[in-house]
Image (tube, helix red, strand yellow):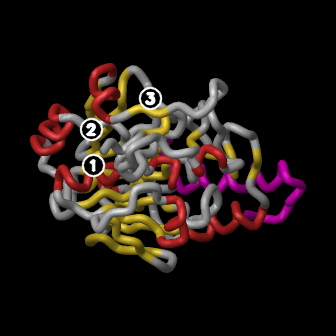
């Protein structure tokens, strides 16, 4: 039986004879059902029309995107840390060429994902490399394809290896997670943020939303939580959810100033 895939969010569902009646992720107010109604595809159909493009983002960091763009269009980031290589966030498309490219780069020991909009075909990736997928337990209800490869974690932080830490920020989703990589940016530290902290088009700021497509902002308390969660970590760069959406210098200060700006826009004049 096929594992149907929602064409709007790109999330793969448990196998079934017929397409599911709907996609709970897209029916949620943070997302949307496609304007032409709920549509489904399969991995086989996706492979016939799309390919993954692999390119270097920085030393020991590789970006993977699907072309033509599919669903939300996020990128995955292959963190080539010698001690603990992993895939950050995920894509729906996985094919032989993608697996070969990742293995040629050293393989991975885990997948870690920021939030449910990027769950995509995470189980396919986990099976291809025989690795766990780390998801925050607060978002358990949004897993559309349960599988033993999924490792739910609780609490506020999860060290995966020396200098590689998952940080629960909340915000966009209750379990919204970012990854701190101490050795990133040539040792100055990097934050892989998905869109929990969305890198702005100016690439000099970040922002925060409860729903990006439906323009629902986060409240002040949620933004303060993100600021508090990331404050203990040093990072010069922020790698966002989409290709070339990177803050390349001064990451800590960019986040601090962006939080303060956001709170001012809400009428919160206190320091971030």
Q: Residue 107, position in %: x, y? A: 15, 50
Q: Which residue is mark 1?
A: 124
Q: Is residue 247 left or right of residue 12?
A: right
Determine contact: label 3, label 1, CB under 8 Å: no
The residue at the point 54 percent across, 71 percent down is 138
Residue 240: percent from the left, percent from the top? 48, 43
Disc on res. 261: none
Q: State whether residue 85 is above or below residue 38.
A: below
Q: Nearer the viewer, mark 3 or mark 1?
A: 1
For the residue pair 137 and 265, the one nearer the viewer reads as 137
Q: Kindly indicate whether the residue at mark 1 contacts the one at mark 2 (C-beta within 8 angstroms).
A: yes
Q: Is residue 252 magenta?
A: yes
Alpha carbon of mark 2 to alpha carbon of mark 3: how far? Answer: 12 Å
Please give the range of residues in magenta. 244-272
Q: Secondary structure at mark 1?
A: helix
Q: Which residue is mark 3?
A: 70
Residue at the (27%, 34%) spot, across then down = 56
């Amino acid at each position: 039986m096929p594992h149907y895939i929602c064409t709007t969010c790109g999330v793969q569902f448990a196998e079934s004879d017929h397409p599911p009646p709907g996609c709970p992720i897209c029916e949620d107010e943070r997302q949307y059902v496609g304007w032409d109604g709920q549509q489904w595809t399969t991995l086989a159909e996706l492979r016939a029309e799309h390919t993954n493009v692999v390119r270097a983002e920085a030393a020991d960091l590789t970006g993977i995107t699907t072309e033509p763009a599919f669903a939300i269009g996020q990128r995955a980031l292959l963190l080539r840390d010698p001690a603990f290589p992993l895939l950050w966030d995920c894509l729906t498309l996985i094919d032989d060429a993608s697996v070969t490219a990742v293995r040629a780069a050293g393989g991975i020991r885990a997948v870690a994902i920021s939030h449910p909009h990027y769950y995509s075909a995470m189980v396919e990736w986990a099976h291809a490399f025989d690795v766990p997928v780390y998801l925050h337990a607060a978002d358990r209800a949004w897993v559309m394809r349960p599988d033993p490869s999924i490792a739910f974690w609780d609490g506020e932080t999860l060290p995966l290896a020396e200098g590689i830490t998952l940080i629960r920020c909340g915000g966009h989703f209750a379990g919204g997670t970012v990854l701190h990589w101490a050795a990133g940016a040539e040792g100055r530290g990097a934050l892989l943020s998905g869109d929990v902290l969305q890198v702005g088009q100016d690439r000099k700021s970040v922002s925060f939303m409860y729903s990006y497509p439906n323009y629902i902002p986060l409240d002040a308390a949620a933004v303060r939580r993100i600021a508090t969660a990331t404050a203990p970590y040093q990072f010069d760069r922020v790698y966002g959810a989409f290709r070339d959406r990177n803050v390349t210098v001064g990451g800590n200060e960019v986040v601090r100033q962006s939080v303060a700006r956001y709170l001012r826009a809400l009428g919160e004049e206190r320091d971030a």
